[in-house]
Structures are given as structure tokens and as C-alpha cells.
Amino acid sequence: MPAWPGGPCPKCGDDMPLNMIHCRTCRHLLNPELERSSVEIPAFFPLQEVDTLVELIPNGRFIECSSCRKELKIHRKYLGERVQCKFCAADFRLDPTSPEVRSTDSYGTCPHCNETLRFDSKYIGSKVACRFCQGKVHIVFPG
């Protein structure tokens, strides 16, 4: 099967360079020895939806009381405020940067299944999967 040698298109007469298959102007097949190939267009199959990555802002923290050493679940709205232990009634300021306030874990609600997730603070900034529904969440720092 010889390549197109170049020259005028047999249909429209426009000059076409060598090795062309179709005329640039009229799309006529330049080499009579070639046949139009039948290209089968595949059937449309919708792709599976990609898992969405939803941001999760921790609702609060689990803090160890500095007096009785019991664990307290404290909402993030109380960060920087004075709080009272529900077990021993000791007052302390909830300052996460203070060495006397020991934060053990954080908690938040999964945006996919609404279950409460407890996670170590080291996972803030990470992309993780919910242990209940396997939904993808990105734990972001509040603020």
C-alpha cells in the first residue's frame, strides 16, 4: 500500500503534502487503495463514583483532669476557658499548650455515617477512613 505522494486532492483539487491520509479541506480519502475503517464506538458505561474526601473538624478533646486523673470529654468551644471536672469539681483552665493539661485524644462526628470517632491528635491533618463506614475523611485543625 503506497503512501500518498503529495499533490492535488482528487476531489477538491487543494494541494496536499505527502504521507497524508485525508484531505485537510474536504476530508476525502487520498489513497484509493485505503478503505475507510469502521471504528466501533464502545457502549457508554458510567464509571463508579469516586469516594469523596470530606473534611472533619474535631468537635473536642479528651482531657485528663489534673487533680483526679479521670478522663473528661470537653467540646472545643471551651478551649481557653476555665472548666470544672465533673468527678472531683476541680477548676482548671483548658489550655492545650499548658503542660499541666494532658490531652489524650480528639473526637468528631463522621460526615458520612454520623458516628462519633475517637482519634489520636497526631491524625489531625491526615486523611483517614471511618472505622464504621469506611468513608474517607480529612481531619483538619479547627480554626
Image (tube, rainbow, N blue to C red):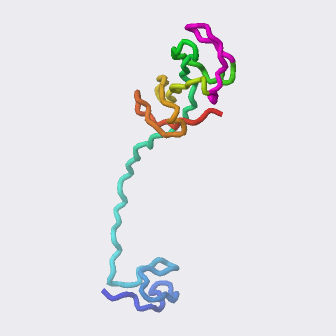
Most foreground residue, 46 or 86: 86
The image shows residue 141 at horizontal and vertical percentages of 59, 35
Q: Quadrant of the C terminus?
A: top right
The image shows residue 84 at horizontal and vertical percentages of 63, 12
Residue shown at 47%/87% (left/top)?
9
Most foreground residue, 12 or 69: 69
> Where, by quadrant of the figure, is residue 18 drawn?
bottom left
Q: In the figure, is residue 37 to the left or right of 109?
A: left
Whether residue 99 is situated above or below residue 33 in the rendered picture: above
Whether residue 43 is visible: yes
Whether residue 108 is visible: no
Task: Please identify the dominant SS of the magenta region.
Answer: loop
Q: In the figure, is residue 135 to the left or right of 95?
A: left
Most foreground residue, 71 or 10: 71
Residue shown at 63%/30% (left/top)?
97
The image shows residue 109 at horizontal and vertical percentages of 52, 25
Residue shown at 55%/25% (left/top)?
103
Whether residue 81 is situated above or below residue 30 in the rendered picture: above
> Per the image, is 94 magenta?
yes
> Per the image, is 67 magenta?
no
The image shows residue 127 at horizontal and vertical percentages of 48, 40
Start-end of magenta stretch:
82-98
Q: Quadrant of the N terminus?
A: bottom left
Residue shown at 49%/23% (left/top)?
116
- Residue pushed farthest right? 81
Count of marks overlaid on the render:
0
